[in-house]
Amino acid sequence: MLVDLHGQHEHQELLDPQNHVRFLDAYAGHGDLVSKVSASYREWRKLQTEFRTLMETIDSRTENLELLKFQLDEIDSVAPLEEEEAVLVLEKSRLANAERLVLLAAQTYEELYESDSSVVSSLGKIWRNLDELELIDKSFPESSESRETVSALLAEISEALRSYSLEIETSPERLEFVEERLATLERLKPDYIIHGDDWKHNNQSQVRKNVTRQMKQWKGQVIEIPYTKGISSSSVKDIIRKEISPSFQRAGNLRRIIRLNSLVRVIEVHNGLSALIGENVRYRKKSFDGFWLSSLTHATSKAKPDIEYVDDTTTSQSIIEIFDATTKPLILDADSGGRVEHFRFTVSNMERLGVSAIIIEDKKGSKENSLSQSHSQQQESIKDFSFKLLEAKKIQTSDMMIIARIESLITGQGQRDALKRAKAYIDAGADGVMIHSKKKTPTEIFRFCDAYNKLRDRKPLVVVPSTFNQAKERDLQGHGVNVVIYANQLLRSAYPAMLNTAKSILQHGRSFESDNEMMPILEILELIGSNSETKRIREN
């Protein structure tokens, strides 16, 4: 039996426009198509909602970026210096207590020298008593050397007091400035430090304590975010060290350091010991980022002239010695690179060793140092030198940089030629450009830098301020310099120091007079890691 039910108002559905499309689709048999369109519409609404959320996120990030930019601009406008607050706190204390400090220094000086019962007056009586003792009893220990030492110390103290009194500044205006500056620095201190909570138990636990203590002093807060478990940066580094050769790791270090730093600071080394100095020396938060193996100082350390006499085998051995003792990237001074076919082998060999960069100069003919007074130096043609760069880049397999050194300012060809060569060498594949000058001032270097910075495909820029050494790093950085190389200072310092010690030994017939100028033997043993020998000497 079939039953067909109808409502009394069912016919009114025909009058509702919202149903017309449905009736038409049903009449046309578009059921499947309607389902697909409906699904697409729901997906579109979902994506639209997600889009709105993303736009809100972008707006929020834009606001945060604007806030961060404002904060950075505020920091830049204040331009705080390294350790400035500590220096200003000390200066504030001196300025605020200037009168008391002057009084104390004057009273102390008077007690030493000027009063009736001064220390010097009392010592005079003591010396006379000792003279009589020594005269009567010849077995009494001779004390003249000790007296001279005491007198010298007192003279040194009195001179220090006199100088100190003259240096103390009593300036209310300066005190007001220092207090205002300290208040400005105080406003820059962060309210929050955010860090993963893994540093509670790893090798950064001491850093955490220091940061927490500092933030407490600043009335700030340390917020620790739960760290992802099972992932350790140290273990990742261990895997890299085990699975990837040290030479491969080191070869790309210079590129990474240049990307991460506004200015890279490189020091000349010529053997393992000088490299240890470059590796470990610190001044406050400053250190050297890498090493420069100069052909001049390397040859000089072998007592050979700088005429490309030192061969690749000797150079490779020196690099191995340096790498055995250090971890920082090394830039090799490869002179002109030699013939193209020879330079290919040099590139391959330096890559295997882990050298981070090779710098070759665009000169030809017999080797002459760029800083010599000779006017016979000639440059390679742009075409031939570019070909050498192209051929070297073809066989390169690592992140080692090949940097072109332009000698146009040395040979007198001028700015235009230097800039022309820079463009050509970059087109040939150079990973960086070094500009050289033997002028006493950096004017022509700065002119080149300013023009070079306008190049579309600009690469990292290297300078060696050997002659124009009055230029400050901040000035070089301000003109776009990326890498500054101190190319010969360690060797030039070492030779006169050794010469003076040798002369002193000959002069005095012993080495005692040179002790204050020499490094203690124990420190040498600690430097080179002779732990058993160090322990034995300490026990004795």
Image (cartoon, rainbow, N blue to C red):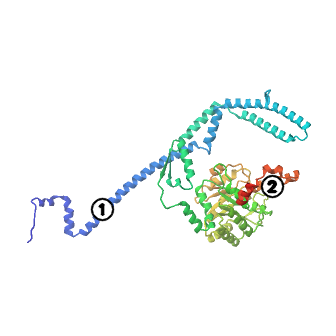
Query: The C terminus is located in which quarter?
Result: bottom right
Screen quadrant of the N terminus: bottom left
Q: Is residue 282 above or below residue 407?
A: above
Asked if residue 503 lies left or right of residue 476, the reply is right
Q: Is 123 displayed left or right of 75 in the figure? A: right
How crowded pointer 2 is (Cα within 10 Å; few <14, some 14-19, many 20+) is rated as few
Across and down, in percent, residue 226 comes to 47, 54
Q: Residue at x 26, y 68 (%)?
A: 33
**Residue closest to the far bottom:** 341
Q: CA distance from mark 1 to mark 2?
A: 85 Å
From this view, report whether residue 426 is shown above or below residue 206: below
Residue 438 location, x and y as percent?
74, 55
Task: Name the residue beneath numbered marker 1.
Answer: 41
Secondary structure, mark 1, is helix
Identify the residue at horizontal 56%, vertical 61% (top origin): 234
Rendering coords of residue 105 (x, y %):
72, 32
